[in-house]
Image (cartoon, rainbow, N blue to C red):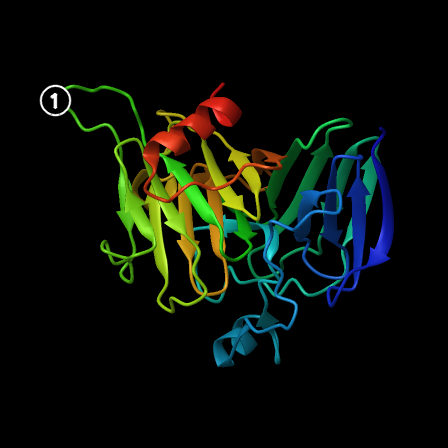
Amino acid sequence: MAVTYREMTYKTFGRVLAIENGVIELYVTLDVGPRIIRYSTVGGANVMHEDIDAKLVEKGADFDEVFYPGAYWRPYGGHRIWLTPEVKPNTYNPDNDPITYEVDGNVFTFIPPVQETLQVAERMIVTVSEDSSEVAVRAEVKNLADKPQTMGIWQISVMCQNGMEVVPQTLRDTVLLHNRRMSLWPYCEMNDERVYWGKTLITLRQDPTVNHPFKIGTSNERKFSAYLCNGDLFVKRFAWSADLAYPDDGCNFETYTNPNFLEIESLGQLVPVESGSTISGEEVWSLTPNVPAPAANDEAALMDIIAKYIEK
């Protein structure tokens, strides 16, 4: 089946571009963002979080001063492009205005307004397979300042509640030397009941009843993370290179959760970007239905899922 698309209104998000191929549905916001606000099998449950009621808003005097009076940032949910290093409020650009888009076959380019504060221009380029669930999401950011700026691509997928994330650990045998890196945030409790520290992987559960946040970063050499929710298996693939300087002490992958959602994040290298130059990063997604989630500490069952669906 060919890839089709149409504009429609979706819940409280206003206009979206609804893209379908007979296997999956992908909705991208047009009045704000952009956000990939829905990714599901046809008629299935959305694996993305939707902040329908605008419960999560960042605002205040610092936002008024940096942006404009009354400025606010809202996550909306779904998938977004961001920039590292994170600076509040500067990187919390109020992307609450309409965007434009272009279509070339099965390639959709979404272009938000220029970010005047950071002096960058973003583009989200989405390529949808004609006959499978595969979606490639490319982020591009151009430096519009008249001098170099040090920054990195940061792609964040905000996932639905009550799911379980699977983060692979590095298997490379370095004998007497270390073989992985991990970064921890001040609010991260190593004994958090939502996390399982396995031998070959880490699992993290999204739990709406647990109020405190949790975040870790890793050097994810196996270049994927997965999310099991509502019987679906969401897989995000991304790049890693030993030769690149990644943010947060070498993390190309980070994950965060709170009572509302769980974030699966890929990061590009942190690099000085010359005036007029563009940096980019790409993820590839897939969605497989009818994959029940085993227990969070059932490492053997999880390894079987990885072997069958991810690291074939």
Secondary structure of the residue carrying numbered label 1:
loop
Q: Residue furthest left?
A: 176
Q: Is residue 295 above or below residue 95?
A: above
Q: Is residue 182 left or right of residue 38?
A: left
Q: Amino acid at mark 1?
A: Leu
Q: Nearer the viewer, residue 250 or 106?
A: 106
- Identify which residue is drawn at 20% across, 20% down: 174
Q: x and y percent of residue 162 in the render?
A: 49, 56
Residue at image x 71%, y 33%? 127
- Front residue of this view, candidates 127 and 273: 127
Q: Quadrant of residue 212?
A: bottom left
For the N terminus, the quadrant is top right
Report whether residue 51 is seen.
yes
Q: Position of residue 156 (x, y in %)?
A: 53, 49
Write down the quadrant of residue 40 in the picture. Answer: top right
- In the figure, 136 relative to 79: above or below? above
